[in-house]
Image (cartoon, rainbow, N blue to C red):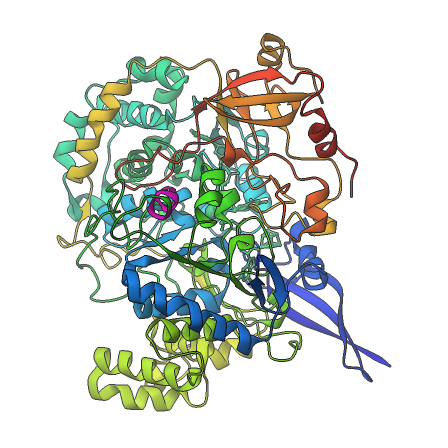
Amino acid sequence: MTETTSVHRICPFCEACCGLKVDIETDAATRTQRVIKVRGDEDDVFSRGFLCPKAVGLKDLHEDPDRLRTPLIKRDGVFVEASWEDAYAEIARRLPPVIAAGGANAVATVLGNPVAHKMSLMLYFPRLARMLGTRNMFSASSVDQIPKMLSSGLMFGSWLGIPVPDIERSDYLLIIGANPMVSNGSLWTVPDYRGKARALRERGGKIVVVDPRRTETAAAADHHHFIRPGADVFFLLGIAHALFDEALVDLKRLATHIDGFERLQPAFADYSPERVAARCGIAAAVMRDIARTLAATPRAAVYGRIGTCTQQFGSLASWLIDVLNVLTGHLDEEGGAMFPRPAAFAANTRANTSGKPGVGRGVVTGRYASRVSKAPEVSGELPLTCLAEEIDTPGPGQVKALIAIAANPVLSSPNGPRLAAALAQLDFMVSMDIYLNETSRHADVILPGPSPLEDAHYDVSFTQFSHRNHARYSAPAMARSDGQPDEWESMLRIGAIAQGHGAEVDVAALDDAALREELERALGDAATPVLAALGSRRGPQRLLDLGLRGGPYGDQFGRLPGGLTLAAIEAAPSGIDLGAMAPRIPEALRTPSGKIELAPQVLLDDLARVAAALAETAPDMVIIGRRQLRSNNSWMHNLPSLAKGTFRCTALVHPVDAARHGLTDGAMAVIRNGSKSIEAPVEISDEMMPGVVSLPHGWGHDIDGTRMAVAAQRPGANLNALLDENLRDPLSGNAVLSGIPVTLAAMGTGGTGGTGAARLSPAV
Ligand SMILES: Nc1nc2c(c(=O)[nH]1)N[C@H]1C(S)=C(S)[C@@H](COP(=O)(O)OP(=O)(O)OC[C@H]3O[C@@H](n4cnc5c(=O)[nH]c(N)nc54)[C@H](O)[C@@H]3O)O[C@H]1N2
Ligand SMILES: Nc1nc2c(c(=O)[nH]1)N[C@H]1C(S)=C(S)[C@@H](COP(=O)(O)OP(=O)(O)OC[C@H]3O[C@@H](n4cnc5c(=O)[nH]c(N)nc54)[C@H](O)[C@@H]3O)O[C@H]1N2
Ligand code: SF4
Ligand SMILES: [Mo]
């Protein structure tokens, strides 16, 4: 006898956060469960039934025999399965001596992308960080978005107070260095971008895409312009210059909320479209036309994403995007770039609904610096590209232990091979990870989290960037295997071990005490009734209820009956719609001046680098990355339904470049950057800008000692084995991943030919 139930689930794989319905069959006798089907939830208030092919990965992931279900401990170089008690005991045996010898900073932490997709990890990492007290905190943010966090912090006062396009009411979108048709949006939670873009164009609006590749997003837009990788700053300066030059600036309502306006025009004076055109590869007339259209269209927005961040001028480009939105009167206006008003956690995520409305402390950077390269701290973290040198450079303050949480930096961070060698030198490493992969293979203990279907979920992060406000919750849908703890429990346990309390602490009591202390500090005597109102909830659910009830739509712990609570969203399985974005300036600002800081001095100073780079000519070939629909960074290549089909880790090359370098379609090419080289099959395509080759990241699964059988069948090449760990945007510390000069050559016969053949092997 079997019984099938249908459960609601927010997809945890990408920032679109689609609402899914998952059919689960339970055997009445054995209680074993199996996923039958994954589909879009038509009733979901936010995603309205949309889903992408990765959603079925939820079934594959749950069933993946390689997904770890018990902890692993490395004994004499070999991983053995262990009980949770033994795994924690091993951490208790080995972590405290590292701290005793080297102090708190001897332990580093590194967080990966899935942390943002796991309520448990997202809400409890701050506690672990406090318990560890280390300055050596690293994350995927510094190979991704930290320039946008910095520019938003400087302009609007909070790290994650980032405006997003109001696509459903916009008539003109300028999309720079983003491919939402494939990525499904980033720092912009927008499920079904395709449908929304189509609707925009059907109502007479236009979409313009600026990208060194004619991407899927570009192909479905009105205009696409190739841009030289890394040259966005010139393009944006050209448009800003034209706005002043042609008297198109109109601050509208924002005029009284702005500081520094008078400093912009002189700063942009040297960058007429005519002067920057050759440097960015876009004609002056195009820049002027974009300036005029932006100014003339009442509802328009400029949006930039990872292509504008992962480059040497990432902070400047991120800033200029919002400068254009402000100068054309599109910031904080309907159909423009607006601030979401999330239901919870703006304070935890350092966004903009906490504290006093309209004014704040703003952001500061460089409160400390990394030991070796002296890279400044930004948003409480150091650049991920500094992690390897912090481990492999001897001296006082050297990192000797690492706690990696849902992170695979060996594949996701530039010069992965150096990092891998550094990890092998550590005295101790813990990976909280669900796979034995390229990074976790270096760990001494691996602690696997539950499958997403066994876990509760609320989008702590992505509600901060959603194009429409909403609140949705997924309860655990499937039973866990015996003894499987929550990931927050493991984090508290590691924290307690680091503080010398041993492995056997009462985690629940620790959690209770920490929350009471936090609330008493924030609320004084009012903490007691708040705690009482939270009742019997514990762990992340209690923090979620706290966040929702104290948030902008909350019931204020009973004072506003009918307001939002966790119980209310539990009772609405397809979520609660909280409406379209509405203007929030000045209330959303958290700058000390209470104004939008349009011309922060550090950014103006950084323009000196731009001036120096204006005359640089294009290298013969440069490399950029690429995202693909059936893949997500490094870790979904083991899921059969996604891994099948055409091999995707190919080097896209323009026909002219292929001819110049003697490359043929399907044959292997050697891509070199100095002494580093990788090999990948060539795919000739005129969707590339001439002089630019594109390779996806997150591949390179041919490293020994991993346990990802499907991924290993077609390992692909690791783009990050080619990139330099020493190239950073100096202000934000973000890695430069785009526009790196490389050489291309056809691969010779013999030698590495065997590897190439393996990489081209047929579909799994
Ligand atoms: N060259 C180049 N490099 C890039 C990029 C690029 O565009 N070009 N993009 C960068 C970007 S934007 C990002 S975000 C980073 C991503 O960098 P990472 O976060 O380091 O990479 P992921 O591949 O997302 O790895 C996620 C890890 O989390 C594990 N995991 C998955 N689910 C769970 C879970 O539920 N619990 C736990 N504990 N672990 C889990 C996976 O097994 C995997 O080890 O890569 C960056 N690297
Ligand atoms: N299917 C899928 N979805 C994903 C992911 C994935 O791996 N697969 N990863 C997720 C993650 S972690 C993130 S951060 C988001 C990222 O979301 P997006 O930023 O939308 O992702 P990309 O597809 O990398 O888009 C970046 C674009 O910038 C272009 N580009 C490269 N260099 C430059 C440049 O110098 N200037 C300009 N103007 N453009 C440039 C690239 O050609 C590419 O089209 O996607 C998320 N969604
Ligand atoms: S777009 Fe695909 S991977 Fe992203 S949340 Fe939706 S279903 Fe999941
Ligand atoms: Mo990312």
Residue 77, picture quadrant: bottom right
Q: Is residue 120 above or below residue 662?
A: below
Position of residue 310 measured from the top left corner of the image (x, y, whole percent): 40, 36
Position of residue 204 measured from the top left corner of the image (x, y, whole percent): 52, 35
| Quadrant in which the C terminus is drawn | top right
| Quadrant in which the N terminus is drawn | bottom right
Q: Nearer the viewer, residue 53 or 403?
A: 403
Residue under the point 59% across and 20% down = 653
**For residue 389: magenta?**
yes
Position of residue 713 measured from the top left corner of the image (x, y, whole percent): 73, 42
**For residue 405: magenta?**
no
Q: Nearer the viewer, residue 350 or 486?
A: 486
Q: Main secondary structure of the magenta part?
A: helix
Q: Which residues are magenta?
A: 384-391
Residue 49, picture quadrant: bottom right
Residue under the point 43% across and 72% down = 93
Position of residue 241 measured from the top left corner of the image (x, y, whole percent): 25, 24
The count of marks equals 0
Residue 680, picture quadrant: top right
Residue 553 showing in the rendered view = no
Q: Nearer the viewer, residue 134 or 273?
A: 134
- In the image: residue 32, left or right of residue 133: right
Residue under the point 20% across and 84% down = 524
Q: Is residue 35 above or below residue 631?
A: below
Residue 48 showing in the rendered view = yes
Q: Is residue 81 above or below residue 202?
A: below
For this orientation, the residue located farthest to the top is: 660
Q: Is residue 522 above or below residue 710?
A: below
